[in-house]
């Protein structure tokens, strides 16, 4: 007569508050080695494995920026990815090394972005 309802914890429903899946470090290292040897499909397989970590790094760096910053977290990840993917001979030893270089790329993207904003601002002032 009464319908049975399953009890659902809203904190875990739909993956909310779950920690991101940690990729197998050996798989990441293997893909980095394959990429280093010229296998471009390795990069395509690698990025989904480390994307959440890259996004967390980008979020960390964006927290230190001004509130009305024109660059967003996803754009920062994408810009860093483009810099990493553009390397002729990637030489990453392991996942930690890759993430350290990605973090450096993100910081450089933010520096380049700030410099571009300063140039635009200076150009507007000179135009007046």
Image: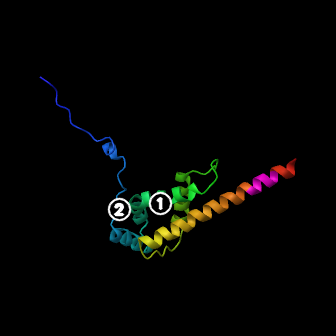
Q: Residue furthest left?
A: 1
14 in relation to 107, above or below: above
Q: Which residues are magenta?
A: 118-123
55 sits left or right of 71 in the view? left
**The image quarter in which residue 86 lies:** bottom right
Q: Closer to the camera, 108 or 81?
A: 108
Which residue occupies 64% across, 52% down? 66
Q: Position of residue 65 (x, y in %)?
A: 62, 55
Where 45 falls versus 6 (above or below)?
A: below
Q: Give 89 or 32, whichever is nearer the viewer.
A: 32
- Disc 1 packing (10 Å; few <14; some 14–19; many ≥20): many
Q: Which residue lies at the image location 55% right of the left edge and 53% below the top edge?
A: 75
Instruction: Tell me, yes or no, if residue 26 can be seen here.
Output: yes
Foreground pick, 24 / 34: 24
In the rendered image, residue 121 lying in the magenta stretch gets the answer yes
Which color scheme did the rendering employ for the protein?
rainbow
Q: Secondary structure at mark 2?
A: loop
Image x and y of residue 114, in percent:
68, 58
Which residue, as the protein is rendered here, is positioned at the far top? 1
Q: CA distance from mark 1 to mark 2?
A: 12 Å
The tag on residue 54 is: 1
Q: Is residue 1 magenta?
A: no
Tell me if I can see residue 77 in this picture. Answer: no
Q: Which residue is mark 2?
A: 22
Residue ID at (76%, 57%): 119
Residue 96: x and y in percent read 44, 71
């Amino acid at each position: 007569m009464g319908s049975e309802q399953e009890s659902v914890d809203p904190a875990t429903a739909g993956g909310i508050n779950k920690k991101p899946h940690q990729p197998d470090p050996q798989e990441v290292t293997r893909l980095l080695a394959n990429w280093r040897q010229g296998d471009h499909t390795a990069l395509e397989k690698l990025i989904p494995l480390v994307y959440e970590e890259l996004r967390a790094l980008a979020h960390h760096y964006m927290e230190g920026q001004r509130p009305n910053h024109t660059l967003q977290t996803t754009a920062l990840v994408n810009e860093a990815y483009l810099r990493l993917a553009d390397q002729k001979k990637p030489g990453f030893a392991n996942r930690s090394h890759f993430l350290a270089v990605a973090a450096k790329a993100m910081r450089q993207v933010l520096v380049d972005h700030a410099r571009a904003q300063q140039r635009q601002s200076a150009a507007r002032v000179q135009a007046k």
